[in-house]
Amino acid sequence: KDDGDDDDEEEKDESSDDERSEQEEDDDDDEQDDDDDDDDEEEEQEKTIKFQRTISSSGTGQYLINDKPVAYREYEDKLASIGVLVKARNFLVFQGDVETLARKSPTEFVELLEQISQSSELKDEYEKALQAKEEADALRLFSTNKLKVIKGERRLLKEQKEEAKLFQDLQDKRKQLQTDLYLWMLYHMEVDRKDRQERLGTLE
């Protein structure tokens, strides 16, 4: 009987140990879940940016980001980094804005769109690039016209060269004809002289 009681006590002790182990494992899991929840909350807080502006009774304003006081420039830059442009007022529609937009001229409307899209910040760079393009176009046009003039002058020189060659050939031919004429005349003069000498010899 004593042995049976001892066995029962050992089984109870083992059962108690198992229950304690399971309880400890459950506690560890709960702690792990709590840690995961804390991490998620921290990540969510890191992703969330809190913007705040306060005005005191004296009229002094203060700008805060995540409850930290900052200068207005830093406050404005931080808003611009998430696409909120204070100057362009692209995140709120104030009373009278729609009517004001409707009254704008096409040029003013384009300027507003450029300001909202921040393309106006590239205006100087765009104007420099446009000026460089215009200068390049002018240089290309000048080079094209100069090439046309050079080609025209080359064609004219070629025609003049051909005319000069033709003239020189005609001059050489004229000289040759004159030479042949003088030789022909000399020949006939010599024949005529001999003929007269023969006639004089006969008369004598």
Image: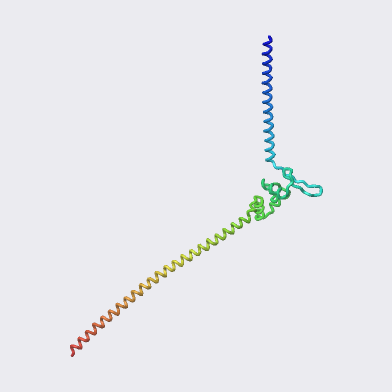
User: Does the rendering let one see residue 197?
Assistant: yes
Front residue of this view, candidates 53 and 85: 53
Residue at 56%, 60% in the rendered image: 135
Front residue of this view, candidates 28 and 43: 28
- Image quarter (top left, top right, bottom left or bottom right) of the C terminus: bottom left
Instruction: Say how many tags the image has.
Output: 0
Above-or-below relation of 34 to 15: below
Front residue of this view, candidates 135 and 101: 135
Residue at 68%, 13% in the rendered image: 6
Residue 28 picture quarter: top right
Residue at 67%, 47% in the rendered image: 81
Where in the figure is residue 43, as x and y percent of width and height? 67, 38
Where in the figure is residue 7, as x and y percent of width and height? 67, 13
Give the residue at the far top of this rendering. 1
User: Does the rendering let one see residue 90?
Assistant: no
Give the residue at the far right of this rendering. 57
Q: Taking 45 as reference, is 57 left or right?
A: right
Above-or-below relation of 196 to 168: below
Where in the figure is residue 30, as x and y percent of width and height? 69, 29
Above-or-below relation of 25 to 60: above
Where in the figure is residue 121, as x and y percent of width and height? 65, 53
- Image quarter (top left, top right, bottom left or bottom right) of the N terminus: top right
Residue 127 picture quarter: bottom right
Above-or-below relation of 157 to 68: below
Q: How is the image coloured?
A: rainbow
